[in-house]
Image: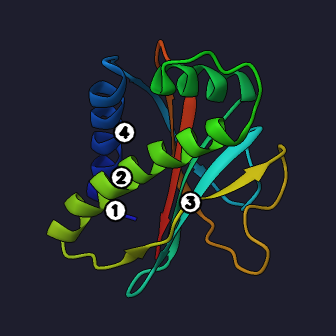
Amino acid sequence: MKAEHVNCVITAVLSVISQTFGEEATKENVYVKNDDDNGSHLSAVIEVGGAHKGAFIISLTEDDAKKMASVLLMEEKNFLDKDVMDAMGEIINMISGGAKGALVEKGLNFKLTPPAFVLGRGTKLFKSVSYAPYIGVSFSSDVGNFNVEVSLK
């Protein structure tokens, strides 16, 4: 992935957090991830198909997922349930959709799948395919800390 492609994803993340939660997210660091292991307790994954292959992933702790979902759903979420996972799926949908619009303008053409969920740190994100390496970006915000990882080949 080119730096300009990563910047499209970062811009989408910052926009989604600002527009959805009325909060500012802070980009903490950028890293390369060379495996397909779940880096946190919960990951919402959208696969990329068509002319390019890869994935968009948001991963976060259970507490941060519940915190973000509570704000998004306007009700306290004390358990990692279907509502929390649906909220994380919606957030990665908005991020990947926003990034896709900017990436299409830069000449990339691809399709996105509905989100899937992976629970458990170290669990493989995909059963039969590898999209590594990923460019990952850590974010912090008042509504939770999270990582967004992207691979486009």
Residue at image position (30%, 18%) is 22
Marks 4 and 3, Cα distance to the nearest angstrom? 16 Å
Marks 3 and 2, Cα distance to the nearest angstrom? 20 Å
Give the number of the mark in front: 1 or 4. 4
Residue farthest to the top?
142
Q: Position of residue 102 (x, y in %)?
A: 21, 59
Number of residues whose C-alpha sits closer than 10 Å to that of mark 1, classed few (under 14), some (14–19) or many (20 or more): few
Number of residues whose C-alpha sits closer than 10 Å to that of mark 4, classed few (under 14), some (14–19) or many (20 or more): many
The answer to whether residue 121 is left or right of residue 48 is: right
Q: Earlier in the sequence, mark 3 or mark 1?
A: 1
Asked if labels 1 and 2 touch by Cβ distance under 8 angstroms, the answer is yes
Q: Is residue 140 visible?
A: no
Asked if labels 4 and 2 touch by Cβ distance under 8 angstroms, the answer is no
**Quarter of the image where one finds residue 19:** top left
Q: Position of residue 3 (x, y in %)?
A: 32, 54
Q: Secondary structure at mark 1?
A: loop
Give the amino acid at mark 2: Val
Q: Position of residue 4 (x, y in %)?
A: 26, 55
Give the amino acid at mark 1: Lys
Give the number of the mark in front: 3 or 2. 3
Give the number of the mark in front: 3 or 1. 3
Q: Which mark is residue 13?
A: 4
The answer to whether residue 48 is left or right of residue 76 is: left
Residue at image position (49%, 32%) is 29
Residue nearest the observer in this picture, 15 or 83: 83
Q: Earlier in the sequence, mark 4 or mark 3?
A: 4
